[in-house]
């Protein structure tokens, strides 16, 4: 449905987006992840025909951003990070105003506003000034704005930014419901939300794509290396290191903390074999009192940090 090809955007001499390319299928919820300044918002603005790229192209259905920007805008509902609301207007009046901009007839607009009020959970604030709403309700009104024209594609830039945990869950549920019928592209810094909401994740760093796939695919592609954390009472670290270094799959033993008779250390391991039985056997044979012993679970956060860390 959407094809991004060799997309590049410079601001002066600074490259915000560097020759990125990927496709988005119809009905997919795609999460665009990356640190601040990675190029996420710039990519979304180009897709929404708000910015022109320096080079490259985006095709939406049979339309490209150069020749058919108006046609593409009709297909897209765009919610920027700060929802463009008029604070002095009542919510209902604001949505009527948006419906007018979309050239929706009055009879049809009343029905559409009622549908969106129910979908976005704003029925109880329809006759309140926008200035009096919480950040969560303002985001919902902004989402209703983006959905007014019943777009096929929804582009959401940091839709849960600044919300409390309850509001985040509510917005996430709305997005998942919308994603059953529409193509959704969203950017977020909340990795757990991306993992829970998105069918597919694209990670951007320094304007380039560094990962693309489902959460399970990203975890699989990240390699077979893993870390085991061990905490022992008593025991000399050099002695401990020597014993665990005899296990072929253990590639390194790192001291994390040693105080008050407790030694915490990390075992870096490679391969697919589970070495925990061998580790426990060494601990038992040396009569080291065991306080803690667990394998680090590989999460999207771990992968994100590895792919976007400096250097």
Image (spheres, grey):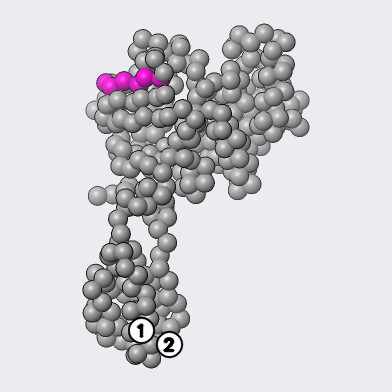
Residue 50, how many percent across, how many down? 42, 19
Nearer the observer, 81 or 300 = 300
- What's the residue at 40%, 65% (across, down)? 296
Answer with mark 2 or mark 1, whichever residue precedes in sequence.
Answer: 1
The answer to which image quadrant residue 94 occupies is top right
Where does label 1 land, which residue? 281
Closest to the camera, between mark 2 and mark 1, is 1
* In the image, farthest residue toward the front: 273
The answer, for residue 266, to whether it is visible in the render is: no
Q: Secondary structure at mark 2?
A: loop
Residue 249, how many percent across, how many down? 26, 70
In this view, 58 is above or below 137: above
Nearer the observer, 260 or 5 = 5
Nearer the observer, 40 or 283 = 283
- What's the residue at 46%, 12% (across, down)? 71
Residue 176, how many percent across, how many down? 57, 37
In this view, 231 is above or below 195: below
The answer to which image quadrant residue 58 occupies is top left
The answer, for residue 117, to whether it is visible in the render is: yes
- What's the residue at 54%, 20% (across, down)? 151
Residue 123, how many percent across, how many down? 74, 30
Where does label 2 land, which residue? 289
Q: Mostly what secondary structure, the magenta segment?
A: strand
The answer to which image quadrant residue 206 occupies is top left
- What's the residue at 42%, 24% (across, down)? 1
The magenta stretch is: 55-60
Nearer the observer, 305 or 114 = 114
Q: Is residue 58 left or right of residue 241?
A: right
220 is within the stretch colored magenta: no
| Distance between mark 2 and mark 1 Cα atoms | 13 Å
Total marks placed: 2
């Amino acid at each position: 449905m959407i094809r991004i090809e060799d997309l590049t955007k410079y601001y002066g001499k600074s490259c915000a987006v560097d020759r990125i390319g990927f496709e988005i299928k119809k009905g997919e919820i795609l999460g665009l992840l990356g640190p601040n300044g990675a190029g996420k918002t710039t990519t979304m603005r180009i897709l929404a025909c708000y910015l022109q790229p320096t080079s490259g192209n985006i095709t939406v259905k049979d339309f490209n951003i150069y020749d058919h920007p108006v046609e593409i805008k009709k297909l897209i509902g765009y919610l920027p990070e700060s929802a463009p609301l008029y604070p002095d207007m009542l919510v209902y009046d604001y949505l009527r105003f948006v419906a007018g901009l979309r050239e929706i007839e009055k009879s049809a607009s009343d029905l559409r506003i009622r549908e969106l009020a129910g979908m976005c959970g704003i029925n109880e604030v329809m006759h309140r000034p926008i200035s009096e709403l919480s950040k969560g309700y303002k985001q919902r009104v902004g989402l209703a704005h983006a959905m007014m024209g019943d777009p096929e594609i929804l582009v959401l830039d940091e839709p849960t930014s600044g919300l409390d945990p309850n509001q985040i869950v509510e917005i996430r549920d709305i997005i998942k419901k919308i994603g059953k019928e529409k193509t959704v592209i969203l950017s977020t810094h909340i990795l757990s939300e991306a993992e829970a909401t998105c069918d597919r994740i694209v990670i951007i760093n320094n304007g380039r794509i560094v990962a693309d796939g489902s959460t399970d695919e990203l975890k699989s592609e990240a390699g077979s290396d893993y870390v085991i954390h061990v905490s022992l009472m008593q025991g000399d670290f050099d002695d401990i290191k020597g014993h665990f270094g005899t296990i072929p799959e253990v590639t390194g033993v790192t001291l994390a903390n040693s105080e008050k008779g407790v030694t915490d250390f990390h075992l870096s391991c490679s391969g697919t074999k589970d070495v925990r039985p061998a580790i426990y056997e060494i601990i038992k044979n040396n009569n080291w009192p065991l306080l803690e012993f667990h394998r680090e679970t590989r999460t999207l956060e771990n992968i994100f940090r590895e792919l976007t860390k400096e250097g």
